[in-house]
Amino acid sequence: MARNNEEGAVWSIMGYLISGLLIWGGIGYGLDNWLHTHYFLLGGLILGAGASIYLIWLRFGRE
Amino acid sequence: MQITGHLASSAGFVPPSTSDFNLPPIFGHSAYLTKPIALVFFSVILISAFFILASRKSAVVPSKLQYAGESIYSFVRKDLGEEIIGSGFLAYVPFLFTLFTFVLVNNVFGIIPFMQFPAMSHVSFPYVLAGFSYFIFHAIGVKRQGLIPYLKGIAFLPGVPKFAYILLTPIEIATYFLIRPVTLALRLFANMFAGHLLLLVFIGGGNYMLHDSHLLMKFLSPFSFSFGIIMTFFEFMVQCLQAYIITLLSALFIAGALAEEH
């Protein structure tokens, strides 16, 4: 099971990074389109990346 | 200088494009039987025949065929089943084994003369395979833990301050329900697509250079061909690797659904 956790972590980390950027970046992009602004996308991407890294730390870095 | 001038003046090399992947129907106008579909059906017959023959007369001292069949099986069972999933892995070995052999054979068809087309370079095939894997790992999770606890386990990580859920829950849900199946399919598709395109470039390019009227081009065409051959070996490696990876990831997802510790 040790191998499972390590190998699983590598792939899950990639998935989390992609989805963090995609979800919060996407929300930012939507807000930009809706409110005719141009800073929510950048904010969303940074927020998403940060949240992903936090999530990865919670999942794999805590023990 | 002369070569470039020559190239520019002639009609020129037509680089391979996505249209090279849309092969015409084999009979008449029926879109239901194209080369990729025929190859997929053939692969199923081939795999079934091989493993039925290999396992028909199982002896203590195995024949070569039996040995080959058993070593593929034990590879999937040990390296992908037992080591990744752990206890209770046996129930999922048939799925993993089918997935692995099916993808492997269809990928390797990409470099076998006269077949030379990886069906997985059409994105719909990997999508279906990823769909199976997606359905199975979620079904296992729901069956093991019940629907609500399973979804709760995915969406809400324990031991996190409440406000952080606003940030994290969308990411978790997107990862499990969107990113995982899509990346699973796209990884296989993109590798097969790019690999086939690469071979088309070098072999098609060599062919074009060989038939070019310019003598220097004829002399240079073996370089393109030999690079095509090198790339064929490289592709063989990628094809095996991608069959392994899609099975590995499916096994990891199943293991995750089985062992979600909440």
Image (spheres, coloured by chain):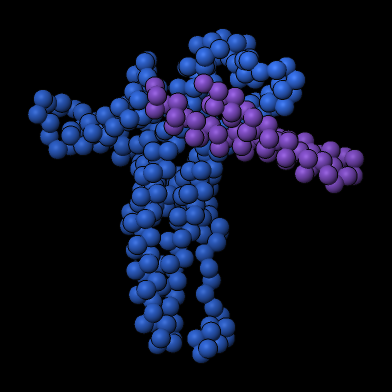
Chain colours: A purple, B blue
Image quadrant where residue B17 sits: bottom right
Give the x, y percent position of residue B64: 14, 38
The vertical placement of B251 against B112, above or below, is above
Outermost residue, bottom side: B2
Give the x, y percent position of residue A35: 90, 40
Question: Image point 84% across, 38% down: which residue?
Answer: A31
Image quadrant where residue A21 sits: top right
* Residue B130 visible at all: no
- Compare residues B68 and A51 and report the one nearer the observer: A51
The vertical placement of A5 against B196, above or below, is above
Give the x, y percent position of residue B26: 45, 52
Outermost residue, right side: A35
Question: Image point 68% across, 26% down: which residue?
Answer: B168
Image quadrant where residue B167 sits: top right
The vertical placement of B135 against B232, above or below, is above
Describe residue A18's horizontal placement relative to residue B32 as left or right. Answer: right
